[in-house]
Amino acid sequence: MAKIIRLISLPIFLKLSPKAIFLTLIFFLPCAYSSGETAAPADRIVAIVNKESITQSEADAFLNLIIMQLSQRYQGKELEEKIEHEKQELMGKMIEERIILQEAKRKKLQARADMVKKRLEEARRSYGSDEEFQASLKLRGLTLSDLEKRMGEQMMLRGLIEQEVRSKIVISPDEVTVYYEKHKDDFLQPEMRSIESLYFEDENIREKLAEDLKTGADFKQLAERYKLAYAKDALSKSQLKPEIREAIFSLKLDEVSAAVRLDKGICVFKLLEIHPQELKDLAGVSERIYNYIFEEKLTVKLSEWIEELKSKAYIVVK
């Protein structure tokens, strides 16, 4: 039995990288946005949004794309859980994108032809050659004009969200200051150690190097003399493996550590400076806070806007 649904989730294309957006176009959009046309005999309609239908083949293709993306980041049980979650959210995301596109068309938004062509060229360059690009289109039953049209539609979606949601979000300097005062713990710079290090794998160097270090030899000069890997850095405890952390954070200023054995080699460290924990000032983190507040507001406002569009739409999931 068909049922009316009301789901809120961010349109998936807002969460994707430019490369992933192109793949979305390739895998999902070839037969999307039909205007009440009859589905192919082997296909079936799984949802209706106003006068347009969503078919099972579209849903399957879109889910396959998401699984492909998730497989690049997760594996095993975690991957299975992510896929199951996306299956639950899939229809809602597809319906939301369809509604937004319908609204963009109703408002007569159009994508700039020069921007579409630019995106098309970027898509071409993402392949090894033009032949590979053309073959990818042909494999999925697409022509260049099909892809150009779908890219234009994606730009319309983004343009409408910019016009109706993003451009209306306002963040005052006071909001940034209040957030900073309430979350100062988030802006604490941890205690750091500035160190020099030498890395080597030849055990025959170890004793000679130890003798040179006892005389206060310069790390850079030793690195050149024995062809060792030299580094200079400032590090916190959270950035270090336990054995390295213990060696570095137990040193006094200008003290050299004992040799620390790692998986494939040996390291020696010298402590140059201790940087105590300190609070980053507001000026240094204001942009980060602004961006965080903006994203929080965008999530809320976008969901509210989509929910409003849904309340005016006829949505049936079969």
Image: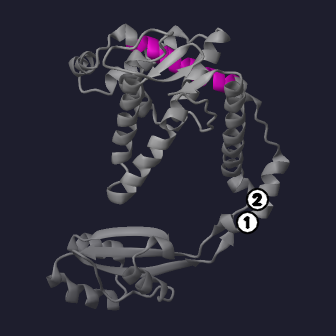
At 42% from the left and 12% from the top, the residue drawn is: 148
Residue 27, given in percent of the width and then of the height, sits at: 36, 26
User: Which label sits on residue 235?
Assistant: none
- For label 2, the residue is 180
At 35% from the left and 59% from the top, the residue drawn is: 77
User: In front here: 83 or 157?
Assistant: 83
- Which element type, helix, strand or loop, lies under badge 2? helix
Q: Is 295 covered by the magenta stretch? A: no
- Which element type, helix, strand or loop, lies under badge 1? helix
User: In front here: 21 or 192?
Assistant: 21
Q: Is 150 covered by the magenta stretch? A: yes
Residue 217, given in percent of the width and then of the height, sits at: 34, 83
- For label 1, the residue is 184
Residues at discs 2 and 1 in contact (Cβ within 8 Å) = yes
Q: Quadrant of residue 147?
A: top left
- Stretch of the chain drawn in magenta: 147-163
Residue 37, given in percent of the width and then of the height, sits at: 45, 8
